[in-house]
Protein backbone atom coordinates (compact mmCIF):
# COMPACT_ATOMS: atom_id res chain seq x y z
CA UNK A 1 0.00 0.00 0.00
CA UNK A 2 1.28 3.47 -0.92
CA UNK A 3 2.11 5.79 1.94
CA UNK A 4 2.20 8.87 -0.31
CA UNK A 5 -0.21 9.95 -3.05
CA UNK A 6 1.33 11.63 -6.09
CA UNK A 7 -2.04 13.14 -7.06
CA UNK A 8 -3.41 14.00 -3.64
CA UNK A 9 -5.09 17.27 -4.70
CA UNK A 10 -6.76 15.59 -7.65
CA UNK A 11 -7.79 12.65 -5.49
CA UNK A 12 -9.35 14.94 -2.88
CA UNK A 13 -11.42 16.57 -5.63
CA UNK A 14 -12.48 13.11 -6.79
CA UNK A 15 -13.42 12.16 -3.23
CA UNK A 16 -15.71 15.19 -3.09
CA UNK A 17 -17.26 14.28 -6.45
CA UNK A 18 -17.80 10.68 -5.35
CA UNK A 19 -19.39 11.72 -2.06
CA UNK A 20 -21.69 14.35 -3.56
CA UNK A 21 -22.74 12.07 -6.41
CA UNK A 22 -21.38 14.17 -9.28
CA UNK A 23 -18.74 11.63 -10.36
CA UNK A 24 -19.49 9.38 -13.32
CA UNK A 25 -19.63 5.61 -12.90
CA UNK A 26 -16.24 5.30 -14.62
CA UNK A 27 -14.72 7.91 -12.28
CA UNK A 28 -16.11 6.13 -9.23
CA UNK A 29 -14.70 2.80 -10.44
CA UNK A 30 -11.29 4.34 -11.14
CA UNK A 31 -11.27 5.97 -7.72
CA UNK A 32 -12.19 2.74 -5.95
CA UNK A 33 -9.34 0.91 -7.66
CA UNK A 34 -6.86 3.64 -6.72
CA UNK A 35 -8.15 4.09 -3.18
CA UNK A 36 -7.54 0.43 -2.29
CA UNK A 37 -3.80 0.92 -2.84
CA UNK A 38 -3.35 4.41 -1.38
CA UNK A 39 -3.40 5.05 2.36
CA UNK A 40 -3.74 8.88 2.10
CA UNK A 41 -6.78 8.45 -0.17
CA UNK A 42 -8.38 5.90 2.16
CA UNK A 43 -7.88 8.24 5.12
CA UNK A 44 -9.09 11.26 3.15
CA UNK A 45 -12.20 9.40 2.00
CA UNK A 46 -13.02 8.21 5.51
CA UNK A 47 -12.56 11.70 6.95
CA UNK A 48 -14.67 13.43 4.28
CA UNK A 49 -17.39 10.76 4.52
CA UNK A 50 -17.56 11.04 8.30
CA UNK A 51 -17.81 14.85 8.07
CA UNK A 52 -20.60 14.58 5.49
CA UNK A 53 -22.45 11.98 7.57
CA UNK A 54 -22.10 14.06 10.75
CA UNK A 55 -23.42 17.16 9.01
CA UNK A 56 -26.42 15.28 7.65
CA UNK A 57 -27.28 14.00 11.12
CA UNK A 58 -26.78 17.36 12.85
CA UNK A 59 -28.46 19.60 10.30
CA UNK A 60 -32.15 20.16 10.66
CA UNK A 61 -33.92 21.02 7.44
CA UNK A 62 -36.46 23.77 7.92
CA UNK A 63 -38.45 25.77 5.44
CA UNK A 64 -37.74 29.46 5.23
CA UNK A 65 -40.69 31.64 6.32
CA UNK A 66 -42.57 33.07 3.35
CA UNK A 67 -42.14 36.61 4.71
CA UNK A 68 -38.36 36.18 4.54
CA UNK A 69 -38.58 34.98 0.94
CA UNK A 70 -40.70 38.00 0.02
CA UNK A 71 -38.27 40.39 1.78
CA UNK A 72 -35.25 38.91 -0.01
CA UNK A 73 -36.96 39.09 -3.41
CA UNK A 74 -37.97 42.71 -2.79
CA UNK A 75 -34.42 43.67 -1.81
CA UNK A 76 -32.97 41.95 -4.85
CA UNK A 77 -35.49 43.72 -7.09
CA UNK A 78 -34.69 47.10 -5.53
CA UNK A 79 -30.97 46.43 -5.92
CA UNK A 80 -31.44 45.61 -9.60
CA UNK A 81 -33.37 48.84 -10.14
CA UNK A 82 -30.58 50.83 -8.47
CA UNK A 83 -27.98 49.02 -10.53
CA UNK A 84 -29.91 49.91 -13.69
CA UNK A 85 -29.84 53.61 -12.74
CA UNK A 86 -26.10 53.47 -12.06
CA UNK A 87 -25.42 51.81 -15.42
CA UNK A 88 -27.58 54.41 -17.18
CA UNK A 89 -25.71 57.24 -15.44
CA UNK A 90 -22.34 55.80 -16.40
CA UNK A 91 -23.43 55.46 -20.03
CA UNK A 92 -24.78 59.03 -20.04
CA UNK A 93 -21.58 60.34 -18.45
CA UNK A 94 -19.54 58.44 -21.05
CA UNK A 95 -21.62 59.89 -23.91
CA UNK A 96 -21.41 63.44 -22.60
CA UNK A 97 -17.73 63.56 -21.69
CA UNK A 98 -15.96 61.19 -24.07
CA UNK A 99 -14.02 62.61 -26.98
Image (tube, helix red, strand yellow):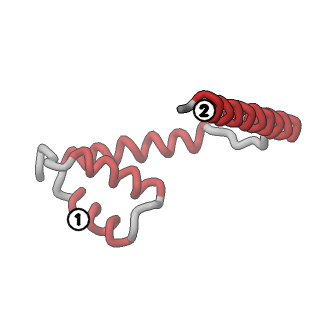
Q: Quarter-wise, where is residue 94 in the image? A: top right
Q: Which residue is mark 2?
A: 94
Q: Number of labelled discs?
A: 2
The answer to whether residue 36 is left or right of residue 14 is left
The image position of residue 62, as x and y in percent, is 75, 41
Q: Residue shown at 12%/44% (left/top)?
A: 3
Whole-Å distance between the Cαs marked 2 and 1? 60 Å
Front residue of 92 and 96: 96
Q: Residue shown at 39%/68% (left/top)?
A: 24
The answer to whether residue 76 is left or right of residue 39 is right
Q: Residue shown at 60%/37% (left/top)?
A: 58
Q: Residue shown at 47%/60% (left/top)?
A: 21
The answer to whether residue 22 is left or right of residue 68 is left
Q: Quarter-wise, where is residue 51 in the image? A: top left
Front residue of 99 and 6: 99
Q: Quarter-wise, where is residue 68 in the image? A: top right
The image position of residue 16, as x and y in percent, is 39, 50
Front residue of 40 and 86: 86
Number of residues whose C-alpha sits closer than 10 Å to that of mark 2, classed few (under 14), some (14–19) or many (20 or more)? few
Front residue of 89 and 21: 89
Q: Which residue is mark 1?
A: 33
The answer to whether residue 82 is left or right of residue 51 is right
**SS for callout 2:** helix
Amino acid sequence: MKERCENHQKCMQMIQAVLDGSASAAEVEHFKLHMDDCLPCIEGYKLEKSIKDALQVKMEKKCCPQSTVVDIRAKIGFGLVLLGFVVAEVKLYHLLFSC
